[in-house]
Amino acid sequence: MIGRILRIEIRRSSALWLALGAALLGTPLLYLAVDGWGGRWMLLALWQREYLFILWPMALGLGAWQAGRDRRSRTGELVAATARPRWQRVLPAAVAMALCGAAGYCLMYVGGAVQVAAYASYLPGQSIVIAGVGVLWMVSGVWLGMTVGALAPARLTPPVTAVVGATVALVAITDRGYAHVPKAVHLLTPSPFGFWGDFVTVLGRVSVAHTVWLVGLAVSALAGFLCSTRTTRTAAVLPAVAAAVVALAILPAGRQRLPVPDTAAAALVCDSEPEPAVCVTRVHAGALTDLREPARQALATLSAKLPQAPTAVHETPESWYEVPPAPQPQDVLLVELELAPWGGAKAGPDELRWRLLDGAGTRPCAYTLGNPDAARANRVARLAAAAWLTDGAPPAGPDRDAALQTWQALGALPAAEQRDRVAALRKAALACTEVNLLDILAGDDR
């Protein structure tokens, strides 16, 4: 009986349009940004939550539209005159709308999960929780929209409700909103996560807090829609207020970004048979095959041409410009990788080899940030050192001509002098002290 009533409501209400809208609009939007999440479960969940700035206002607007069905058909007075209480009359429509809103969001997730499942090497449980909280956002949005539509039965209510919802949702994903909106408002918006990357997760307490808040908001919204008197509708606000207070108490203090480092995602997965060892992070395990040969070629080149060469290659989850200048390990060559959305490393073998040999097997240091001249000089020197190691011209790029001249000038020196200068550059780059690498490599020949 209940199933039959729900099927009727789904057919005659806007519930089906909500499900189709979320699935057929959300999934293509996800794939427009597939480079940002392809092959990574956590980023799929976070990107989908980001798109709530579109989906949540849609749920609000369609909920408000559904609430005005009796008014549009001019049957409001007739229906109100029946003996059945209001909650019995409107509850099936509310349940149907919530189910379809949740189903649309789940279908959108499945649409992305098909891609991720084919290429991902790491499934963090918290990613599923984050997606589940997104379902609660859709349910609460539908019921909140229905309440607004019932309280303000006007033609403009649905579009105005959607616009207001979009404004609130956009607050969460803009830097201006993050900087100027009160913390309490920002943390309770659909996607308050700020910037994220391949090696982050969301604390369980954050998802718990959002669940508490959304359950309270959904209860208040549904109660406000089902109730028929001003007193009961006023009292219906209490669950949302209480849930907001509890949620804010659970959420982390301060204005820190909610994503935190995921040590499990950054754990190393290695291939050491045969030696030398080549390691990538767990979330990038699919790129190990692509990195293996370029890494071993780079290690062999460094060992043949320079003293005290590294003996292993490890991927690092930290970008060089995100960490303060600090000495780098001499025996391990650190490299950053980008994962291609359709599997493997985004860079090809030649690009990986040049990246590994850049700076004679070292990473740039952050002391050049804010000093364009020093940064360019170091880039040129690092590229010229890689060209010397490969015995080939540098690849195309903005610093190619300068690096080519430096490499050619270096090649005119005696072989021992060439090796000493590149070794000195490597030593200085490993120390990460504030020096001009081009002065070390070119000397008085500049």
Image (tube, helix red, strand yellow):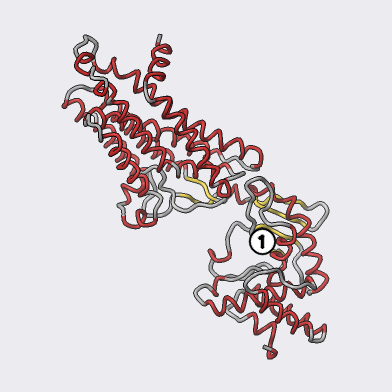
The answer to which of 15 and 85 lies nearer the viewer is 15
How many marks the image carries: the answer is: 1
Residue 130, image x and y in percent? 48, 39
- Examine the rendered structure and indicate whether residue 213 appears above or below residue 35: above
Residue that numbered label 1 is attached to: 335
Residue 232 falls left or right of residue 398 = left
- In the picture as drawn, the residue positioned furthest to the bottom comes out as 444
Q: Is residue 42 visible to the viewer in this orientation of the structure? A: no
Residue 54, image x and y in percent? 41, 41
Residue under the point 47% across and 28% down? 103
Residue under the point 35% across and 31% down? 62
Residue under the point 82% across and 86% down? 414
- Examine the rendered structure and indicate whether residue 133 appears above or below residue 46: above
Residue 239 falls left or right of residue 391 = left
Q: In the rendered image, which quarter contains the N terminus?
A: top left
Residue 104, image x and y in percent? 47, 30
- Examine the rendered structure and indicate whether residue 45 appears above or below residue 148: below
Q: Is mark 1 on a helix, strand or loop?
A: strand
Q: The disc labelled 1 sits on which kind of residue? A: Val
Q: In the rendered image, which quarter contains the C terminus?
A: bottom right
- Examine the rendered structure and indicate whether residue 61 appears above or below residue 270: above
Say few, some or many: other residues with alpha carbon within 10 Å of mark 1 (under 14 / 14 to 19 / 20 or more).
Answer: many
Find residue 342 and report its image quarter.
top right
The answer to which of 256 and 230 lies nearer the viewer is 230
Residue 278, image x and y in percent? 74, 56
